[in-house]
Amino acid sequence: MEVPASHSKHKLDLSRLNPAQREAVLHDAGPLLILAGAGSGKTNTMTHRIAYLIAERGVAPHRILGMSFTNKAANELKERVTKLTDKVAGKNSTKGLIVSTFHSLCVRILREFAPRIGFTPTFSIMDPSDQEATVRSILKLINIDAKKFDPSWILFQIGQAKNNFLEGEGAIEFFNTLKGPKVSYDDYSIALQSVFPRYQERLRLNNSMDFDDLIFNTVKLLEEHVDVREKLSKRFKYILVDEYQDTNAAQFRLLRALTCTHDNLCVVGDDDQSIYAWRGADPTHILQFDKAFDRTKRIILDQNYRSTSTILAAANEVISKNSKRFPKSLWSNLGEGSPIHTVAVEDDRAESQMVAEEIIKRAGPVVDGFGTKWETRERPWNDFAILYRSNTQSRIFEEALRLHQVPYQLVGALSFLDRKEIKDTLCYWRLVINPNDDIAFRRVINWPARGIGKSSIEALHQNSVKTGRSLYEATLDAEFVDTLNERTRKGLESFHNLLNSLRAGLAAIDRAAFPNLDGAFLSQVSLWAKNSLDLIGAKKALQDEEDDITKAQKRFENIDELANAIGMMDLATDNAGGPSNGMIVLQEYLAQLILDSKEEEKDEDEKKHGITLMTLHGAKGLEFPIVFLVGLEDGYLPHQRTINEGTDLSEERRLFYVGITRAKQELYLVRAKNRIRYGKALPRNPCRFLEDIPQDLLIERDESATPSFKSEEAKAKHEQDVADFFSEIQNRLKKKTP
């Protein structure tokens, strides 16, 4: 029991919490499982619990660790805790508090203890394009056709093995259970078994890790080194985890290790919203939490603050059909609300037209701003969301919205980091920190051009493979370099001089020179980054690449913004004291860029205007006044792959439940009776989960020309038509196959 904080000015106000939330906040010690239904105020509960530990229990902030799955969620939680705690305990009351993602935490731990597992603290983190380039080079090395074997699929399965903490024989056994696309089962298994160890060896040689390695290697570190495990467990006396239903095997083992000296683990989640099994999430972690951690206190948050009673009644009925779950039923004080609309339309185009026209009608008439050019509506466009099972469904809705001149935002755009000028600049900065980063080395060794051609780079590569060293280390071998032509030797000398100059300038920026001025310290690092662009010759290189000087300038402004952003970093740190020099600031900046890019989050300003189009997976955690769930047919939801495999449909049902509970006021459930495929109308069956919603909650509309089934015989004939259609397509494909 901690001693109450003597510096508290006021008592923490818990009066706005409901009884279950208050019970969770006041929980003393030991494992706590908070089952937080959709829209039940889980973030508010976590915020008050952390604030309570600091302000009322006197727990030092650096002894508390909060974890979430996105930086956005982690930042929001920390900001809310700080705002709440500062009111009752004074400013800076949360200094030292760590709220981060799993991966950010692991980067922090690995920077401190990386030598224990054979890496240096300056290890690089590979982004997806770097990973794919590495796999392609390995496939080429072992004479496997990358066109036949999809590198992205190979990487996904390697990631799955790591997320399940599999290596060696365990990984081989896992690969043997997989069936890859395009080629035979055995061929893909052999490819995976050949690539995986070489891929890991290449990462180690380059002092690099991929995204999945961050947790895998941290768990390995903690499980193999008792002193490190106990040190960190004692450092973090209270651990809180959000979205616990999304944890995978490696994350579970990480939490086990971090609680080896105590059991003060509070997890918040909802087994009914576990929808990420395809990337390793295992709902049994939340379902069996009380078995894994003795003396668990279980609290259910079932009061929903988002949706009407009608929407919740439908959601409760749907999810109740899943057998493996904690029984709970959401309720609300927001009133009964409108009935749910179910709409059947003829085909794809009719579906998109109906949704676009309904949104325009629901948005209300245009208000012209009393003669000005302003255009507003009774409802803003961002009140609406169109949610679907698969990204491929978005295209026809985009067409319909553009036709009606309705603004929209398609969530899931190309990452800013994928721009060529951004990747080139970051590769230079990566080499300043970690010269053994082969991917970065290969990308910029001749950018801007310095006379090092493809044949010279290939010679470097062959030498590095032969000697088991990085490309950079190969260039330090004077005997080997002497075998290269004079132009290449001069180019390599220029490249080395550039990197050495950049590295020396950055290392000279010492935080000790700015003891109380973090802003001044970061400004110096940011200035170094700006100057590095001049030393590299980035502006001229971009001008040489572009015929349009305006476009070249815009690309230069992109990389200039990278340098600016360093000056806006948050130096909030734990008790370790934070970055001591410019090198450490840059390595943390590079790591954060990669971690942020994995979340695929759009800037909030981009979401303020326009209808949101996104997948059901992407919509979890969000809410909208009016939601259109489209494509509600067997084959889309539940997905055809799940139907074909005959596997459990519980996760597909949870996905439907997540979609329903995104709606605050009104919900439309839309399906087409036919889909146009290969120029023919393919009959479709309604999503089987629709049958679970009581009729008295619905207003049903049929806007199609195709009649509904009047009998079981008609339904059987419809299903036979579907089967015949697929059979015909398969026969056509067989005839085309040589």
Image (spheres, rainbow, N blue to C red):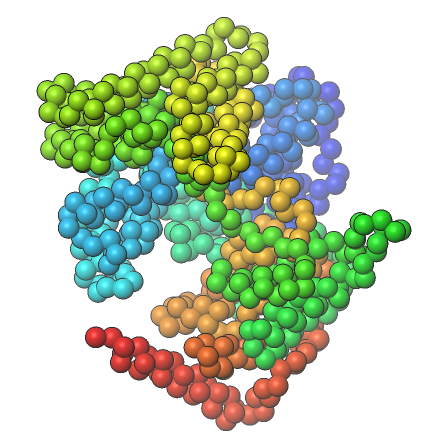
Viewer-proximal residue, 663 or 154?
154
The residue sitting at the top extreme is 513
Residue occupying image coordinates x 71% and y 55%: 381
On the question of residue 238 being in view, the answer is no
On screen, residue 52 above or below 635? above
Residue occupying image coordinates x 27% and y 64%: 182
On screen, residue 321 above or below 543? below
Q: Is residue 129 left or right of residue 694?
A: left
Picture coordinates of residue 144 (x, y %)?
18, 53
Quadrant for the C terminus in the image: bottom left
Q: Is residue 129 left or right of residue 397?
A: left
Residue occupying image coordinates x 53% and y 44%: 601
* Picture quadrant of residue 102: top left
Residue occupying image coordinates x 31% and y 29%: 449
On screen, residue 409 above or below 199? below
Picture coordinates of residue 52 (x, y %)?
64, 30
Q: Is residue 246 left or right of residue 399?
A: left
On the question of residue 609 being in view, the answer is yes
Q: Is residue 363 left or right of residue 469?
A: right
Picture coordinates of residue 517 (x, y %)?
57, 11
Quadrant for the N terminus in the image: top right
